Amino acid sequence: MLKQLCTLFCWAALASNASVAAPSPVVTKIQSMLAKPSVLCGRFDQTKQLNGMKKPLASNGRFCVVAGKGVVWRTLQPFPNTLRLTRDEIVNYQGDRVAMRLDAKQEPTVRMINSVLFSLLAGDLAQLDTLFEVDGNADAATWHVALKAREPALAKAIGAISLDGGAYVKTININEASGDHTTIVFSAIQTGDTAMQPEEAALF
């Protein structure tokens, strides 16, 4: 996840010049299918296949998306690690120790990074539509979206992204320009204030 943050700085720099266009019909349809709870938590299972390596790297943990506040991404296996993104900062915890802190006062792109990650996890395609060309389809209960970066520099940095879901995002696939591939699968979705564990609620 920390590597993705480095890439997201590229996103943020480009996003400052992105124009906001009217959402496409498929984006509008998918947005109407998505549930929009104030608190969304669940399990994630992440698999990263590095170019040239046979065995993928696997991790899992929990995430919470809190509307208007931010995101908590807690890796539990193979090594505990917590990433908290709020409007004003990004903090990486190694146990109880703060391993990294990015403050929006010193790093103005922090707010944009927060916005992009929140949009991915929440399935906010209208926001993503400012950075990517959105090509997708939807039936009565499920949808699929492929995102292609509008700017060549962004395409080179991040590659291509696809999302699948229904009422919530179920899978995110990231194909990096380097040949690395990451798949994140979300499950055990819960909503509402009781969805957060005490240690997660304490971070907000």
Image (cartoon, rainbow, N blue to C red):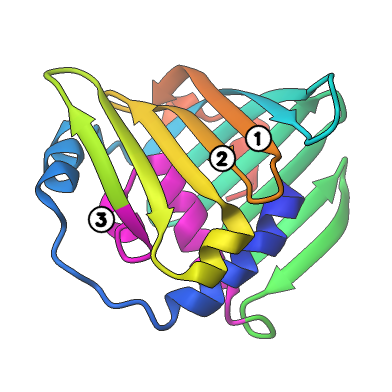
Does the magenta segment cover residue 24? no
Residue bearing the label numbered 3? 126
Does the magenta segment cover residue 120? yes
> Is the Cβ of the residue at disc 1 closer than 8 Å to that at disc 2?
yes
- State the CA–CA distance, disc 1 to disc 2: 6 Å
Q: Where is residue 82 in the image (x, y as percent from the top left)?
A: 74, 42
Q: Position of residue 112 (x, y in %)?
A: 50, 69
Total tally of numbered discs in the picture: 3
Disc 2, SS: strand
Residue bearing the label numbered 1? 181
Above or below for 72 versus 113: above
Of circles 3 and 1, which is in front? 1
Tell me which secondary structure the magenta stretch mostly adopts.
Answer: helix
Disc 1, SS: strand
Which quadrant of the structure image shows residue 106?
bottom right
Q: Which residue is at a point 65% across and 35% down the rendered structure image?
A: 181
Point out the image quarter for the N terminus.
Answer: top right
Residue 87, can we see it? Answer: no
* Residue 70 as seen in the image, left or right of residue 25: right
Q: Which residue is at a point 19% across and 69% down the rendered structure image?
A: 21
Q: Earlier in the sequence, mark 3 or mark 1?
A: 3
Type of amino acid under label 1? His
Q: Where is residue 83 in the image (x, y as percent from the top left)?
A: 70, 48
Q: Earlier in the sequence, mark 1 or mark 2?
A: 2
Residue 144, can we see it? Answer: yes
Frontmost residue, 73 versus 181: 181
Q: Badge 3, how many Cα within 10 Å: few under 14, some, many 20+?
A: some
Q: What stretch is highlighted in magenta?
A: 108-133
Which quadrant of the structure image shows residue 108?
bottom right
